[in-house]
Image: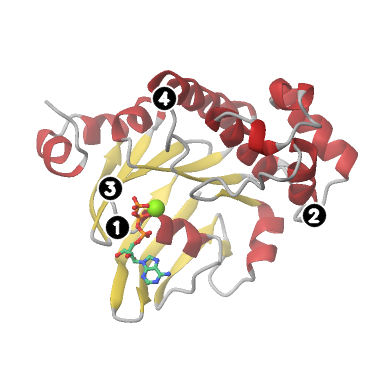
Amino acid sequence: MIHVEELSVSYGAVKALRNVTFSAPTGRITAVLGSNGAGKTTLLRTISGLVKPSSGTIHCDKTALVGMATEDIARFGLGHVPEGRGVIAEFTIEENLRLGVLASQVSAAEGLERQFELFPVLGERRKQYASTLSGGERQMLAMARALIGRPSFLLLDEPSLGLAPLVTAEMMRTISSLCLSENLTVILVEQNAKSALRIAHDAVVLHLGSVIASGTAESVASDSDLRRYYLGLVQ
Ligand SMILES: Nc1ncnc2c1ncn2[C@@H]1O[C@H](COP(=O)(O)OP(=O)(O)OP(=O)(O)O)[C@@H](O)[C@H]1O
Ligand SMILES: [Mg+2]
């Protein structure tokens, strides 16, 4: 389980997160939803140790993450697919994956082989430059890179961004099956509430840095005020 308690983050005078508290249960997908500037990326970057909170705690099971170095958090077993995917276009698929090997404790052979089993399309094209991949394939590459170290916890920042609806639906199915097969505890950040709520078990809604709702995905999806005012979903 990932448990975030009373987490606050400021960038100078900007309060990006205000006393955020929620839990992401083990082996489940927790969607973190909210519009532009809600604080979603800041939340993931703080969990990964890239941003220091002004107050609050973050635990992965019994391990306290605040104060740990980013690379130690990654080695501990937390994968992070950043906003924009962080794939290096001038590198091949294999070279991008080798970056994931560097941040892990697995051997290159073992790490790459396992990802090519999970994502056969990447194996077939291992020597191809990432610049030649479609948006959906780039997202798979970013996920494969994050999974190389066999993390227990996975943070995904807007995986559907820029993808066509059919590709988004396929991506969501992939996330759902990875969660099951790899027994991952997933935090799925999305502005695309409709797609995320289809696969999420639980959901948290952020607005201007505060949690305004949380609960099962069904309860959030069926709240008409949340749908209309915060999730951009028509009735
Ligand atoms: N490095 C930074 N320096 C200053 N302010 C920042 C920085 N990063 C984010 N912010 C501000 O913090 C707030 C939360 O930003 P954040 O990127 O976490 O939101 P978000 O929910 O991910 O938005 P989006 O859906 O557009 O990606 C915004 O007001 C943003 O302008
Ligand atoms: Mg963001």
Q: Which is closer to the viewer, label 3 or label 4? A: 4
- Mark 4 or mark 1, whichever is nearer to me: 4
Query: What separation in Å lies between label 2 and label 3 (alpha carbons)?
Result: 33 Å
Relative horizontal placement of residue 1, taking residue 125 as reference (left or right): left
Residue positioned most to the bottom: 12
* Circle 1: residue type: Gly
- Secondary structure at badge 3 equals loop
State whether label 1 is within 8 Å of ligand 1. yes
Q: Nearer the viewer, mark 2 or mark 4?
A: 4
**Display colour scheme:** secondary structure
Depth check: 19 or 3 in front? Answer: 19
- Name which quarter of the figure residue 189 lies in: top left
Question: Do callouts 2 and 3 mark residues in contact (Cβ within 8 Å)?
Answer: no
| x then y, percent, for residue 188 | 44, 41
Badge 4 amino acid: Ala
Tell me the crowding category of disc 2: few under 14, some 14 to 19, or many 20 or more residues within 10 angstroms, Cα based. few
Mark 4 neighbour density, 10 Å: few (under 14) some (14–19) many (20 or more):
few
Which residue in the structure is indicated by mark 4? 164
Residue under the point 70% across and 21% down? 121
Disc 3 crowd, CA 10 A, few/some/many (<14, 14-19, 20+): many
Q: Which residue is mark 2?
A: 102
- Disc 3 within 8 angstroms of ligand 1 (CB): yes
